[in-house]
Image (cartoon, helix red, strand yellow):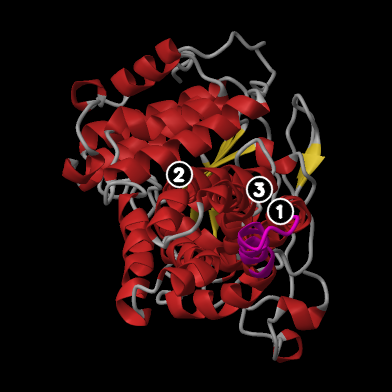
Amino acid sequence: MVEDLVCRRGGRAVFGPLSFRLAGGRALWVRGPNGAGKSSLLRLLAGLGRAESGAVRLDGGARPTRLGETGWQEQVAFAGHLDAVKPALGVAENLALWQGLSGASDGEVAAVLERFGLARIARRPAAECSAGQRRRLSLARLLLAHRPVWLLDEPTVSLDQDATALMADLVREHCAAGGLAVLTSHTDLGLPEAETLALSAAATPEPATTARPSADPFLEGRW
Amino acid sequence: MVTGKEPGSEPSSESGLQAPRQPGTVAALRAIAARDLALALKLGGGGAVGLAFFVLAVVLIPLGVGREPATLARIAGGVVWVAALLAALLSLDRLFQADHEDGTLEQLMLAPLPLEQVVLAKAVAHWLVTGAPMVLAGPLLGLMLQLPVGALSALGLALLAGTPALSLVGAIGAALTAGIRRGGLLLSVLVLPLYIPTLVFGARTVENALLDLPWAPPLALTAGLSLFAAALAPFAAATALRITAR
């Protein structure tokens, strides 16, 4: 079974037009200097941004869908720069919401906490956790969500060596089960089998014709 | 290559993707509301601060206008309602802003339920924290303002019928200002005019009860405003949040 992910995006100053295709069970390492649009690409793939043009398709799998359709958000899991961790709540309490949203069982949550080395501090308020522990908690969501497409924006920031290796293992397992992963990282994750996509900041000078004077969705009449 | 499965994952065929799970909508909504309630209880004692503001604002009135019972009873309905509007407004600015800042909003947008339902769940949690205590405290404050016992039930019912609209309409304003760092003032300016119908009919309910006029019609209109807000606000707020997230 082959998963096609084709992304074309033209006209916008950040990057593109960009096309690539990722087969099922493969990981894609998006590389590039700061400002090259790596995060923009991932947010766009997650459906959080909006493409100027172009299309993203997910073929095959349980439910073929394309970006912009209602089913898309149920196919992707996104881990961005923000941890989405509430400092006032405990580690396990933080996961409770995502457990409710994913329908995961208590045993599954316990297994995920164990896997990320968080079981020992499950009751500690997230405010007292280190940045790396919060990052692990944030990444633990990926295993609860059970989405075929993982979009990881700098997943290893503030993780120690063991956790970085764990992350690489998880991506490998995810891919082995037929999933897709698109990730950005400035450090080598230890995924030699991952395909790479290089984004460069200088390659696409801002096209003057398509620079929009107004980005107001109301004025564009398509909000 | 490691070929182990994720812990607890369902067995999936060799070449197939794991199917995303479909939790019950009710369970998902409950999880969102429960989280907001837990956060409200841990941060600043939940609705206690809002309730204290509500009580204080009402208590200040007799100090300002004197303790003439007829005067106090005449203005009681309006005073309690204005205090309720302001108290509801106070807690609104963090409704979506906190989630926007820490990335929770992004994750909720990818949740397997429509953003409209997320908004509704959060508005319900907001009402439970701020609206429900005011419904309970309102009649007591009415008693303090020399409102006759017969009108107290009208005040309580009017608050019960009208405060949901405060949380729901407020959610629209909160969604519009979620991305603005100091959006509290702007939120007030946006939302207070939208509260006017609820204020008018809510206060009218109490006044009619005081004057022995039928108070069921304004009460029904107050409840109708809440239902209208429940139907419209989730869509408006979700649209605003999608624009904010971009």
* Both labels 3 and 1 in a single chain: yes
User: Is residue A179 toward the left or the right of residue A174 in the image?
Assistant: right
From what the image shows, is residue B67 above or below residue A141?
below
Residue B136 is marked as 2
**Res. A79 visible in picture:** no
Q: Are marks 2 and 3 in contact (CB under 8 Å)?
A: no
Looking at the rendering, in which quadrant would you find the C terminus of chain B?
bottom right
From what the image shows, is residue A77 above or below residue B140?
above
Mark 2 element type: helix
Task: Return the residue at label 1.
Answer: B219
Instruction: Report if residue B211 lies within the magenta region.
Output: yes
* Both labels 1 and 2 in a single chain: yes
Task: Return the residue at label 3.
Answer: B115
User: How far apart in space, not on screen, are marks 3 and 1 (Cα)?
Assistant: 31 Å
Identify the mark nearer the N-term, 3 or 1.
3
Q: Quadrant of residue B99?
A: bottom left
User: Is residue A76 toward the left or the right of residue A62 in the image?
Assistant: left
Residue at 54% in and 64% down = B77
Please, what is the three-letter code of the amino acid marked with disc 3?
Leu
Please, what is the three-letter code of the amino acid marked with disc 2?
Leu
Query: Label 1 is found on which chain of the structure?
Result: B
Instruction: From the image, give the main secondary structure of the stretch colored magenta.
Output: helix
Residue A176, image x and y in percent?
55, 21
- Between B163 and B147, the residue placed more toward the observer is B147
From what the image shows, is residue A6 above or below residue A192?
below
Residue at 32% in and 27% down = A92
* Span of residues in magenta: B200-214
**Res. B245 visible in picture:** yes
Q: Which mark is in front, 2 or 3?
A: 2
- Between A154 and A72, the residue placed more toward the observer is A72
